[in-house]
Image (cartoon, coloured by chain):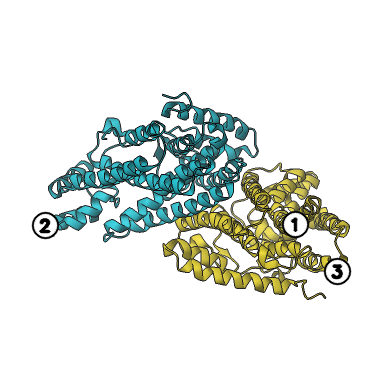
Chain colours: A yellow, B cyan
Amino acid sequence: MNKSMYQIETLQKIINDEIARRAEVLSARNPAELYAPVNYSLGMGGKRLRPVLLLMSFNLFSEEIENALPAALAVEVFHNFTLLHDDIMDKAEMRRNKPTVHEKFSENSAILSGDAMAFLSYQYLMECRSKQLFDVAGLFTDTALAVCEGQQYDMDFENRLNVTEEEYLEMIRLKTAVLLGCSLKAGALLAHATDEMASQLYDFGINLGLAFQLQDDLLDTFGNQQSFGKKIGGDILANKKTYLLVKALEKAAENHKTELLRWLNIMDFNAEEKISSVTEIYRQLGIKELTEEKIDACFSQAANILHDLPVNDLRKEQLSNLSKNMLGRRF
Amino acid sequence: MNKSMYQIETLQKIINDEIARRAEVLSARNPAELYAPVNYSLGMGGKRLRPVLLLMSFNLFSEEIENALPAALAVEVFHNFTLLHDDIMDKAEMRRNKPTVHEKFSENSAILSGDAMAFLSYQYLMECRSKQLFDVAGLFTDTALAVCEGQQYDMDFENRLNVTEEEYLEMIRLKTAVLLGCSLKAGALLAHATDEMASQLYDFGINLGLAFQLQDDLLDTFGNQQSFGKKIGGDILANKKTYLLVKALEKAAENHKTELLRWLNIMDFNAEEKISSVTEIYRQLGIKELTEEKIDACFSQAANILHDLPVNDLRKEQLSNLSKNMLGRRF
């Protein structure tokens, strides 16, 4: 491998070191009550997927990845801002095995420190004093608004039983995929790639993001608790409108539909029984296979776009490895 | 008056017309649940002080105010975003005689639509395709973060009795004054004013903002309910750390201090009695006069800065009128 091509782990370390450096700066800022939750949130870890994608995309065209590091930080800070606010809205108590910000501090802290993170992400982004910054800031802003739209759709779906596959895919495109696309496109733009290549990388990110979210839906029901890292069946218990449930409601004939609706409406139930009964309906309807097919289709689409990108194959290897890695070595 | 110099009412109308035009665009966007609270918030009215200041500042140097209109919208949308989130944090039920967004819709709506407004303000701002946009966006972002810091200080002060005058002034500088300064400076920058003049206008805005907030503190206790538009004594009932209370705690000798602290700690009380008793302590300590002196000092500082600004006096008349108007014709 070329020395100037960075591997996933190296990039994660570069990003984590930079987050640690920034955390010191933030912890010296006042008021401490505003910045402590920011550092808590950024210090929770995670795979740093979005900044890694940004740097890898940049690295397809340029070796000076430190020039893109502020933008990489920006997408990570933005992503964590969305987690703070989403966790309040979803009343989530835990994230990455730690109390969420509104549980650890307060709801007001999670709102206000979240707001501060949104603006902090712009501060970091604007450190990239590049001619492309205008376009990147526009992309970043459009993406941020799209993510809000996705979260609103997700909340709206809670009260609906007639969500179509198309609506579901549009929701996860907005809520999850556009930020991956944005990270990849921003990296490409900052490295002076052509608009066409930047667009191809955006589309690669969208398809990768869809596959990634669908995989997450699948593993929540059919995964291995150890490797998934969360309790299996959480989505079923919460009646979450996942791809699995949307497809099951679409495919089910009268008898299965009645049983599914009974489980969706029942207030008093045994958790294990609900999980195993709904999972059994999914099995009988072939939902696992349908979901795997959709994941494969999205992943293949992403792989084809990356394959067609007019960049030396060796340079694309890291992005290809990362995308396989994201989908749990199924590919 | 020169035809190209816009009066307050004309600017307010230009801004309100533009908000109405944007509202139509927003109401056609999906999901409707995300954008309805945005339009509700922007349609609540208000004096449009910040965008008026931006356009007036721009108008000191240029007549093509339509070039600055997107930036004017941006500061207004940003200001309304802070109101949505502050109202959740303060559990405020009413604003401008209407239910607040979290009361009218839901808390989740107020969080998420508020977030959307923050990004919408960047979208509007970036419509100003000016060479100065880089500097303006940086100023806007630093200001946004400062406003978050101010709100955090304000919340922290709720649990403190030893807030100093200096701390209080720094809090209102961040929470209120910097956005006025930002609006004025952004207008100047977009009109290609020199950096020095832009800075002078920023400082004018800071002092005007301080005077404005101190006046608001004063009127909450000593104002006329009719012209103030809110119930008198709200700050006293809420134990709000206003300039009046901070100064009273600083000035009070033992007997007054004991009584003030009793009113601050008492859980069960008659509202009218608490308001009249605390107001009486303020009277005995000369707090009204002290506050008026401070307002006069800030206002004079603002007026001097405006006076020294090397722009034709006639051009400055509108800003001078507006600042007097803001302080309720006391000047």
Judge whether residue B226 can be spotted in this image.
yes
Task: Identify the image quadrant of residue A61.
Answer: bottom right
Which residue occupies the foreground of this view, B233 or B103? Answer: B233
Residue B62, given in percent of the width and then of the height, sits at 51, 34
Task: Tell me the tag on residue A192.
Answer: 1
Which residue is tagged 2? Answer: B255
- Sequence-first disc among 3 and 1: 1
Gap between marks 2 and 1 measured at Cα: 71 Å
Between label 2 and label 3, give the one nearer the viewer.
3
- Label 2 sits on what residue type? Asn
Q: Residue at 24% of width from left, 33% of height from top?
A: B224
Task: From this view, report whether residue B278 is shown above or below residue A331.
Answer: above
Task: Tell me the tag on residue B185.
Answer: none
Callout 1: SS: loop
Left or right: residue A312 versus residue A58 is right
- Label 3 sits on what residue type? Leu
Task: From this view, report whether residue A143 is shown above or below residue B26.
Answer: below
Q: Chain of mark 2?
A: B
Which residue is tagged 3? Answer: A314
Callout 3: SS: helix
- Label 1 sits on what residue type? His
Left or right: residue B143 versus residue B28 is left
Task: From this view, report whether residue B109 is shown above or below residue A3.
Answer: above
The quarter of the image holding the N terminus of chain A is: bottom right
